[in-house]
Amino acid sequence: MPAAVRSRLSRIAVAAPAAAALVLGTLAIASPAIADTTSDGPGAAKALQGTSPAWATPQADAGAVPDSTPATARVYLAGRDPQGLAAFAQAVSSPDSSQYGEFLSAADVKARFGPSEQQVKAVTDWVTGAGLKVTATTEHYVEVSGTTAGMTKAFGTRFRNYRTADGTQSAPASDAVVPAGVANAVLDIGGLTSVNQKSASQAVSVAAAEAKAEGQNPAAQSARSAAAPQATTDAKGQNTLPTTPTCSDDGYGSKTAKGAPTGYEKNDPFAPCSYVPSQLRKAYGVTDAKLTGKGATVAIVDAYGLGTMEADADHFSTAHGDKPFAPGQYKEVVTPAKWTHQADCGDWSGEEALDVEMVHGLAPDANVVYVGANSCEDADLSDALADIVDNHLADIVSNSYGEIMHGKSGDLDPAVIANDNQLFELGAAEGIGFNASAGDCGDNSPGAAATGVNCQADTNQAQTQWPSSSPWVTAVGGTALELKDKKGDYGHEVSMGDERSVLSTDGKSWTPAPGQAPFYFGGGGGVVKGEPQPWYQKGVVPDSISLVAADGTKSATPQRATPDVAMSGDLVAATLVGYTPTGGAYSEGGYGGTSVSSPEYAGIEADAIQARGGRPIGFANPGIYDRAGTKAFHDVNDAAVHTKRGNVVDLGVVDGALKVRLYKIGADYGLSASAGYDTATGVGSPGKDFFKSYRLGKQH
């Protein structure tokens, strides 16, 4: 990842974990005269808090940015009635409201809450009057370009260079100020620093995670095979480990790793064979409810697009006993001619394949719309979300990417948060629900990032990720799912979190020893610092959780806690995915991460829409918390599940040597699942009465 970049991490573990984030524009600005911003029309000028980052200090000052330096920015529009939008979105999303489910069309949302022509004209006149050029205008922002001198005149702040840990960066010396005459029209301004912010796919394959742990590059995907192991014996006739990959194919722990040294208990089992969609449907009640997601539409947002996606999904489905897409059931919204930053963003193919195949696998008759952003930069991902909202492309949206909100290179641009939240509120008003994976790095602390294989090294504190931290998003955490049998009957779940040891060269011990192994991979969650507790969490999330932020900061009032729900996503109890990488051949491999969990839950929601007779759910969280503590959800509780936690993963012979690892599940970093709501699994995973609770005739 480039030095000045922080990234949103997608939530799966993939063949080449892509670092991705969003660039909101670069600005290099100097110090011409600043326009008077205190007397332009009625009302008062508005300072935009956070537009000058914390690292822009006098002590770090490295001089003015030349006036002639080119610069770009986005002026995000507040719309006609931002307070009314939030209130309406809450009312139509809350089962106890008289307006519940009375969603508006996209056109009506635009007419009622979108920016007026007068607001757009006022903003345009303001920025062009300062010498800037308008390069794009949408329902959500006015994009401008020009010089540092023009930016300084428009935004009421000088631009300076600063010495940072990532080199010299430019930023406003003070918060940008919006003139009084346009203050009510402006939501925020993005792209005022030279630090690029982008999101990363969180998909992780078994092969990629293992390669990263050993400092290698994965050569191929790794699928744990159910083939009979080729066992051997030592000189004394004792069983030794098989020399070909094997796994537990008839339920969790169905095959004992004979010949392996003692791990977390005597006779550790082989890890489960990578799960396929039919097993997940059975485990989470879809099969028994006889639901297929018919009538619902799920959108998936990632970066770029895989040219073979539909063919690969059809191949994967038919290979595992499911139906391929029907004609017209799968659609794509991609613009390859506009793709940028591929080198920085990495390969998102595995993420896309995982997302599409999980949604189709959990809801085989649901329509799927893949919306590929033009890069992994925040601005481009937000444009993809806006396309879905503006054109009502779906009922449910799955986002398997994210980024930390606080890092050594600074905090997430407040404009990203403000714009995304507005898009999520607009979607809620239309009856569109947004899901986001909660991350694969436990509490995202420096301790977790020191050894975790899908973490951001830039983190400077325990924290949650964006966009799963948004109060208008369903944050989806991860679990390790344990099946009773090959069919997929539900057994148990524990929190998603793994520790890893390596078989010694003589095959007699594990290194590090069990109980001393470092954190490897785990679901994200925690309490969002500074974000007030949303209405739907009151009475469910206890004060013992909500009054303490992820980094330990105490609050006088409750705060937003994540995740909201959880589903299967562990890298040990992996999920099978198949696709054709660019220039390669189709293959299948095991994947893990909350990038698995988010599209799984989107598929489950599509099935719930069918159970409701086709009525959209909209923003799901109020209904989720109404169901907390009922049989609609499995209350995942690590302490209550008495099962073997050690799992031997036999990766077969690589470069002439047997590759064997020992993983402990239910060992997240800084998080754990307990009775009731917890910050590892939220209210739990879909349970026995989940679909029954959504059947037509029920209030919610």
Image (tube, helix red, strand yellow):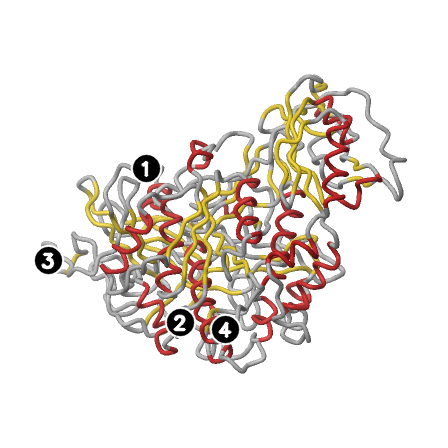
The alpha-carbon separation of the residues under discs 1 and 4 comes to 38 Å
The alpha-carbon separation of the residues under discs 2 and 4 comes to 13 Å
Q: Is residue 300 left or right of residue 274?
A: right
Asked whether 474 or 88 is in front, the reply is: 88
| Comes first in the chain, label 1 or label 2 | 1
| Mark 4 neighbour density, 10 Å: few (under 14) some (14–19) many (20 or more) | many
Res 39 quadrant in image: top right
| Mark 2 neighbour density, 10 Å: few (under 14) some (14–19) many (20 or more) | many
Q: Which residue is mark 2?
A: 284
Looking at the rendered structure, the kind of residue marked 1 is: Asn
Which of the two discs, 3 and 2, sits closer to the camera? 2
Q: Secondary structure at mark 4?
A: loop
| Comes first in the chain, label 3 or label 2 | 3
| Mark 1 neighbour density, 10 Å: few (under 14) some (14–19) many (20 or more) | some
Which of the two discs, 2 and 4, sits closer to the camera? 2
Query: Vertical placement of 240 versus 182: above or below?
Result: below
| Comes first in the chain, label 1 or label 4 | 1
Image location of residue 169, percent across then percent down: 63, 26
The alpha-carbon separation of the residues under discs 1 and 2 comes to 35 Å
Q: Which residue is mark 4?
A: 635
Residue drawn at x 77%, y 28% as measured from the top left: 129
**How many labels, in total?**
4
Q: Is residue 457 visible?
A: no
Instruction: Quadrant for the C terminus, please.
Output: bottom right
Res 289 quadrant in image: bottom left
Q: Which residue is mark 1?
A: 217
Query: Vertical placement of 574 versus 446: above or below?
Result: below
Looking at the rendered structure, the kind of residue marked 2 is: Tyr
Res 158 quadrant in image: top right
Q: Which residue is mark 3?
A: 236
Q: Secondary structure at mark 1?
A: loop
| Comes first in the chain, label 4 or label 3 | 3
